[in-house]
Amino acid sequence: MLTKFFSAFYTPWHWVFHKHCQHLEGLMCFYYGEMKRRHKNHTIMENSITIENRDIPLLGLGTYGMTGESGIKGIVEAVETGYRHFDTAQMYNNEEEVGEGIRRSGIDRKEVFITTKISAYNLDPNDVDSSTRRSIEELGTGYADLLLIHWPTPGMDMEATLNAMVNLKEEGLTRHIGVSNFSAGMFRQAISLAPVICNQVEFSPVVSEFENLEVAREHNLMLTAYSPLGKGRIKTNALLTAIGKTYNKTAAQVALRWLLQLGHVSVIPKASDARHREENFAVFDFELSNEDVGKITSELNHDA
Ligand SMILES: NC(=O)c1ccc[n+]([C@@H]2O[C@H](COP(=O)([O-])OP(=O)(O)OC[C@H]3O[C@@H](n4cnc5c(N)ncnc54)[C@H](OP(=O)(O)O)[C@@H]3O)[C@@H](O)[C@H]2O)c1
């Protein structure tokens, strides 16, 4: 009865309308799916990577050598430029300057991601504990976002060192822990022992680290590329310069973009020159073609 009642109103026009709605719904589903797919990729391909529910900016500022008042000024200016990720270490003797620069910039502590590293001579669990407390005091930021083993040493007890770092994480002195200068095999071992989120290694178009990259990809972790500009040498590289011309970008920008487009890679170029910092920051407004990515990978790389 009810069906009859409705079918009386169900004219061919309704059928056309119904069909259009189905079509529209299909289009919307496709659009939504596509946006989700793109968004998913963007968490890695754009300016941050999400690990342990934290968005980590993929572009950071390396601070080795940025000391004293000029170092502090450099950090303040970097925050103004847009940098939200800073890399320091006990060995750099500038944790105080990095913390002071961040404070003077006026940025909210929660908005910045700070990495520091435990020196190779502080890897005994007691020294891990005391030296990290000293680092946090020097930084004056309450906690670090990422605490790394700077360099592994032959006599290191990896499990004991990592356990001491986990204790600091549980106490809230660091948000995350990780390693640096670990081979792919050691990175795997560290992952099996503790919740490490990162391995920081030298990686640039002239120093490859694809085995470590594979480990990071497999475990959805981050490989941080230090000396991503080949310690400044890359700026005169002929291939990178030629590719850069087609995008109106410099060789340094192409090198950083290449690393970022590999996925799971964050970069921490160091620049005490403000113009360099601005140039290095402008790498999210262009995309290298697959062909150019392949060219750089095959023509420049050699294993470290
Ligand atoms: N975990 C480790 O063992 C380890 C080891 C080495 C480094 N790191 C970290 O990685 C950071 C970066 O590495 P890095 O300093 O060795 O090398 P890098 O970032 O590859 O190169 C820095 C050099 O490149 C110059 N530069 C920066 N931007 C440039 C641009 N757009 N055009 C031309 N030249 C440019 C800088 O000059 P200006 O300073 O004059 O601007 C500086 O001389 C360090 O600061 C440190 O935080 C970690």
Image (spheres, helix red, strand yellow):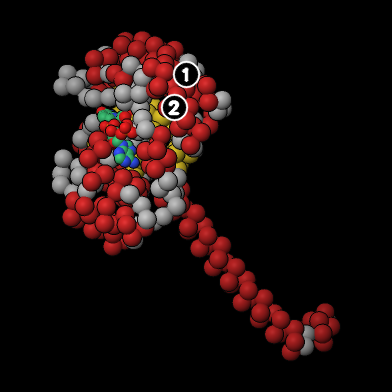
Q: Which residue is mark 2?
A: 75
User: Are the two marked residues, 1 and 2, in contact with CB atoms closer than 8 angstroms?
Assistant: yes
Where is residue 242 shown, x and y percent of the image? 26, 57
Q: Earlier in the sequence, mark 1 or mark 2?
A: 2
Left or right: 222 as drawn, with respect to 238 = right
Picture layout, residue 288 above or below residue 178 = below
Query: How far is disc 1 from disc 2 in space, using C-alphas?
Result: 9 Å
Is residue 54 in view from this perspective?
A: no
Where is residue 37 shown, x and y percent of the image? 48, 58
Picture layout, residue 243 above or below residue 251 = below
* Label 2 CB less than 8 angstroms from ligand 1: no
Quadrant where the N terminus sits is: bottom right
Is residue 74 in view from this perspective?
A: yes
The residue located at (42%, 18%) in the rendering is 69
How many numbered tags mark residues here?
2
Where is residue 176 shown, x and y percent of the image? 41, 28
Left or right: 157 as drawn, with respect to 108 = left
Where is residue 239 shown, x and y percent of the image? 22, 54
Point out the quarter of the image occupied by ligand 1. top left
Q: Which residue is mark 1?
A: 100
The residue located at (78%, 85%) in the rendering is 10
* Label 1 CB less than 8 angstroms from ligand 1: no
User: Around disc 1, counting alpha carbons within 10 Å, would you say few (fewer than 14), some (14 to 19), or many (20 or more)?
Assistant: many
Q: Nearer the viewer, residue 10 or 277?
A: 277
User: Around disc 2, counting alpha carbons within 10 Å, would you say few (fewer than 14), some (14 to 19), or many (20 or more)?
Assistant: many
The residue located at (45%, 45%) in the rendering is 47
Disc 1 secondary structure class: helix
Q: Amino acid at mark 1?
A: Glu
Q: Amino acid at mark 2?
A: Ile
Residue reaching furthest to the bottom: 12
